[in-house]
Amino acid sequence: LVVLQYDLTAAPAAQPKNMICGQTVGLLVAVSMSYIETDMTWVRTALAPAVAIGIMSKLGITHPPAGAAAVVFATGGLGWSHALIMLAGNVIAVVTATIINNLSIKRQYPTFWGFPSFGALFGGGKVEDEK
């Protein structure tokens, strides 16, 4: 996470949308799968990141650390409260990286937030000039 935020600041996986939404998907999938009752924990541990990465890829919010979190959370030792703590940590990490990276004129983070503007959500986006 820190390598993405402070060294690979332009990488799509380092942008806030990918970090927050990707991590949310990974945690939702993994914690949900941890409720599958089986003696073979390795099945959940293998299946959770595969499903999470597939969903993230389809939604365009791939975030590699979210795949790793899916492995850890799929084992069943961590629950929803731990997932919320991890998401809060990601939000804090985004805020901190935004402040620190933008102290220098040579760096910019994030390069894009990735969320539509409020106006674009309601059809008030940019209008092209008619000729």
Image: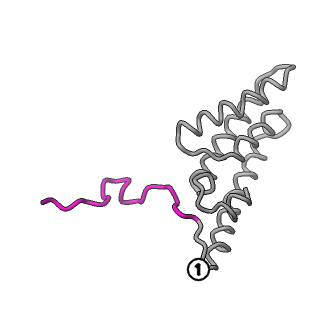
| Residue occupying the point 12% across, 60% down | 131
- Tag 1 residue: 105
Amino acid beneath label 1: Ile
Measuring from the top left, give residue 11's x and y in whole percent.
60, 56
Measuring from the top left, give residue 8's x and y in whole percent.
65, 60
Asked whether 72 falls inside the magenta stretch, the response is: no
- Give the overall secondary structure of the magenta segment: loop
Measuring from the top left, give residue 112's x and y in whole percent.
51, 61
The 10 Å Cα crowd at callout 1, few under 14, some 14 to 19, many 20 or more, is few
Q: Residue furthest left?
A: 131
For label 1, the SS is loop
Determine which quarter of the picture holds residue 28.
top right
Measuring from the top left, give residue 44's x and y in whole percent.
77, 27
Quarter containing the N terminus:
bottom right
| 103 w.r.t. 66: above or below | below
| Residue occupying the point 57% across, 64% down | 110
Task: Give the colour scheme shown.
Answer: one colour
| Residue occupying the point 61% across, 33% down | 54
Asked whether 117 falls inside the magenta stretch, the response is: yes
Viewer-side residue, 58 vs 26: 58
| 127 w.r.t. 42: above or below | below
Mark count: 1
Determine which quarter of the picture holds residue 91.
bottom right
Q: Is residue 119 left or right of residue 131?
A: right
- Residue extent of the magenta highlight: 110-131
